[in-house]
Image: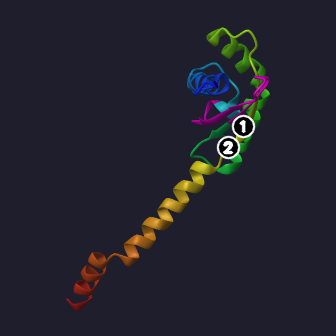
Amino acid sequence: MPKEFPRAARLSAQLQQELSDLLRSDVLSDPRVYGVDLTVTAVDVARDMGMRTCLSAAWVEVAQLEEAVRGLNHAAGKLRRELGSRLRLRYTPELTFKTDVGLREAGRHQSALARGARRRSPALGAARRKKIKE
C-alpha cells in the first residue's frame, strides 16, 4: 500500500521551510541576494532525492530577480551544506534555483480584474452619473 505523503513530498516541504529561513538569515553575503526579499515558492525533489529545483520569487523588477537567482545558484554549495547540517540528511540534494514570476503575474492579473470590476460596478456607475448631474 503506497504512502499518502511520500518521502519526496515531505522532504520538499521541509526543504522549502529551511531554505526560506536560510534566505532570511544572514548566511549569504552576496550583494545580488542580500538586498532582495526572496521567497521560495516551490521545491521539486527528484524521486531519487538527487536533484532539487527551487522556484524563487520577489516583488522586484524581473532583471533584479534574475540577478538574485544567479547569486543563489552561485551560493548553492553553501546553502546545500547549511541544509545538510540543519536537517541531518545522509545525502543533501543538489540545488538549482529558477525564477518564478507567477506571483508577479498573479498580482498583475488581479489588479487588472479589480480595475475591470470597478468600471462595471453598478453602484460606482450610479455614483458617477449622480456626480455628473450635479
Write down the quadrant of residue 115 in the picture. bottom left
Q: Is residue 134 above or below residue 92?
A: below
Q: Residue at x 43, y 65 (%)?
A: 114
Which element type, helix, strand or loop, lies under badge 2?
helix
Q: Nearer the viewer, residue 37 or 82?
A: 82
Q: Position of residue 49 (x, y in %)?
A: 75, 23
Dots 2 and 1: beta carbons under 8 Å?
A: yes
**What residue is shown at x 65% (from left), y 38% (from top)?**
56
Quick one: 43 or 130, which is closer to the camera? 43
Residue under pointer 2:
65
Q: Position of residue 76 (x, y in %)?
A: 76, 24
Residue at 76%, 29% in the rendered image:
46
In the figure, 33 relative to 85: above or below?
Answer: below
Q: CA distance from mark 2 to mark 1?
A: 6 Å
Q: Report the disc number at residue 69.
A: 1
Quadrant for residue 36, please give it: top right
Check disc 1 and report its element: helix, strand or loop: helix
Residue 98's disc is: none
Q: Is residue 73 left or right of residue 35?
A: right
Q: Nearer the viewer, residue 47 or 59?
A: 47
Which amino acid, by three-letter code, is at mark 2? Leu
Q: Nearer the viewer, residue 13 or 82?
A: 13
Count neighbours of disc 2 (C-alpha within 10 A) and say few if under 14, some if 14 to 19, many if 20 or more. Answer: many
Residue positioned 64% across, 18% down in the render: 27
Q: Quadrant of residue 88?
A: top right
Amino acid type of disc 1? Val
Left or right: residue 96 compared with residue 9: right
Total marks shown come to 2
Q: From which residue to which does the magenta span run?
A: 34-54
